[in-house]
Amino acid sequence: HIRGQGPDFFEQACTLGLEGIISKRANAPYRSGRSRLWLKAKCTRHAKFVVGGYTPPSGARSGFGALLLGTFREGRLEYVGRVGTGFSRRQLEALHARLQKEEEAQSPFAPSSSLPRSRAVHWVRPRLVAQVEYTERTRDGLLRQPSFLGLREDLDPEQLDPFGDRLEEPVRPPSRSAQEASAVTVADISLTHPERILYPEQGVTKLTLAGYYEGIQEWVLPYLARRPLVLLRCPEGREACFYQKHLGKNQARTVARIAIREGHATRDYVYVRSLSDIVALVQHGVLEFHPWGCLVDDVEHPDQMIFD
């Protein structure tokens, strides 16, 4: 085992193509079963793929089941697998509406034994680019445990690097226009600098955080929506954070405000109504949301109590 230097050890494990590492609190005993004292950190990769089709939904799911992904090599769209996780219900419905407009009778993929052959598969013109997180590829080049992160509206499907998931050499910081072009859309909000690291130890990026809130929206919004917020902002990452009660007028302008009297003055507090508002605040460096115990409709009468 290796004692200490966890981030460096994890990075090296991922560089070597390993699945990840398991960490144990140094003074904890060795016991079988699951425990918070043992943590598994899995290596993941991010890459961009072309959407060439989709499968129908099953059960109570709406929209579609999974996107069929590929990458262009020498003018041929080669199948790399399907992604069916990482979508919110809203994304499923909105993306399905877009896909229906792009449907065509013939498969855009090159022949492959891995390609789904069900008549229920819907083929689409290869115009959309999806950013996906996954653990590794099989010997056949298929993605393992892929998860959808968002659409890349700024990219041309035929200009993608077919080996874009490889480790690359450090490059000169891009210009402002290039940074804007690399924005990723989550919940209809454009995230600039999506790869900015917030938690260095875990490799959590701004995009990962937005995706996390997207994944838990059904649980967090009932306790967060329409409540005045105190925000923990970390524009430069977790090491440079501060609490903020009042955002400037030009910050996250799409997010709702409510005027609340404080002493002899009235100040504006922000509150969220939907996932889009949460992501808009993540774009402006918000890491944590601390809600009041009341709703904006009646700030003088709290309706919930939080035991911390």
Image (cartoon, grey):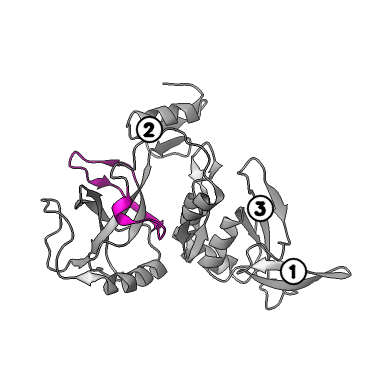
Query: Taking the image as drawn, is residue 194 in sight?
Result: yes
Magenta stretch contains residue 111: no
Residue 201's x, y, as percent? 52, 36
| Callout 2: SS | helix
Q: Is residue 125 left or right of residue 42?
A: left
Q: Kindly identify the amino acid type of the residue bearing the numbered disc 2.
A: Cys
Query: Circle 2 sits on which residue?
Result: 14
For the magenta stretch, what is the residue range? 134-160
Separation of residues labelled 3 and 2 (CA atoms)? 31 Å
Instruction: Name the residue that disc number 1 marks.
Output: 268
Tag 3 and tag 1, C-beta contact below 8 Å: no
Q: Are marks 2 and 1 in contact (CB under 8 Å)?
A: no
Residue 282 lies in quadrant: bottom right
Q: How many marks?
A: 3
Callout 1: helix, strand or loop? strand
Give coordinates of residue 195: x percent, y percent: 49, 46
- State the image quarter where residue 247 is shown: bottom right
Write the residue at 66% across / 62% down. 251
Quadrant of image for the N terminus: top left
> With respect to residue 94, does 183 lie above or below?
above
Taking depth in this image into account, of 148 and 1 the one nearest to the observer is 148
Q: Mark 2 or mark 3, which is nearer the start of the sequence?
A: 2
Judge left or right: residue 277 versus residue 228. left
Mark toward the start of the polypeptide (3 vs 1): 3
Residue ID at (67%, 43%): 240
Q: Toward the viewer: 105 or 204?
A: 105
